[in-house]
Image (tube, rainbow, N blue to C red):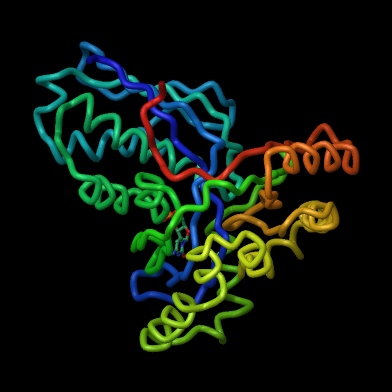
Amino acid sequence: MRLYSLLAAAKINLYLEIVGSRPDGFHELIMVMQSVSLCDRITVRSIGIDEIRVRCDHPLVPADDTNLAYKAAALVSQRFPGVMAKLGGVEITIEKQIPVGAGLAGGSANAAAVLVGLDLLWNLGLAQGELQALGAELGSDVPFCVAGGTAIATGRGEQLDSLPGIDSLHLVLAKYESEFVSTPWAYQTYRAEYGDTYTDAQGWQARQSQVRSGDMVRAVAKRDAIALSQHLYNDFEKVVLPAHPKTAALQATMADLGGLGTLMSGSGPSVFTLAESEAQAIDLATRLRSALPDPDLGVWTAQFIPSGVRLAS
Ligand code: C5P
């Protein structure tokens, strides 16, 4: 096969707590991550010439070596020297559906799909754990995006423990197209404002144990949508919403619509509201569009899914 098409799922954070500053300069996190059915399509195709090319239909996504999808291919070709000379280079086509710069891990999902796609295209026979280890070199969210589903993520976000999936939950996602949050800015601002709450490695362990046996993880384990919705939590809301009043107003409007629960995802600025059925998600999305009839507002419906990257049918 000279071509593979894959679907790369966006993620949301059902829970995100920042617990400290790591010696490597990153932040120590405790998160519950969830894959959702809003997907980009990534196609990897062999080309005769020994190089990596990226094509993307989205004006804000660079089609050069700064794209994380390009970096994923460069990393694989560097780890398996000679493979491109033997089997040819690769053209990566990215068809974007996941909003860019939204806190939905779109770039990480694309990189994860390139890792999975090149494993197939170049017959590397890598196990999922090996793909995730490569992914961790590219970005903190890439390992989760490879496997997807529902997981507790700790460390930088790369240490994963699967949780039982809740595939029956639906959601509405919304983001103002003109609003962007820089993830490094969000972490720096959080550190400046809340750095005095950070604990040491012993404190992280203690907090991890509390979260693992706490309300959110119990709700997921019991597949209790109501309890899960009541315990949605994201530390980034404390710094991102005050700096982005339009997104704060969006969050408040979505929370008033009567869905199960509303939260900003990751470092934002996308916001989601959970719904118990597809019909409720569609109804919430319709009411959100009439409450905020702004052409700058993107609104999507999606559902929880059990996988990160999968072959497109
Ligand atoms: O790993 P990733 O490339 O997604 O991280 C983007 C930026 O977010 C990092 O450069 C770092 O500033 C910040 N970050 C952090 N702690 C994490 C993950 C990311 O400080 N656990």
| Percent position of residue 276, x then y | 68, 49
Residue at left 63%, top 65%?
A: 232
Task: Please tell me in which quarter of the rendered image ligand 1 is found.
Answer: bottom left
Residue 176 quadrant = top right
| Percent position of residue 277, x then y | 68, 44
Q: How many marks?
A: 0
Report the side of 91 relative to 262 (left or right): left
Q: Is residue 7 above or below residue 129?
A: above
Report the side of 71 relative to 270 (left or right): left
Q: Is residue 234 above or below residue 169?
A: below
Q: Is residue 22 above or below residue 69?
A: below
| Percent position of residue 155, x then y | 37, 69
Q: Quadrant of the N terminus?
A: top left
Residue at left 57%, top 30%?
A: 97
Q: Is residue 223 above or below residue 280?
A: below
Residue 191 quadrant = bottom right
Residue 88 quadrant = top left
Q: Quadrant of the C terminus?
A: top left
Residue at left 43%, top 72%?
A: 28
Front residue of this view, candidates 158 and 274: 274
Report the side of 175 relative to 101 (left or right): right
| Percent position of residue 265, x then y | 61, 55
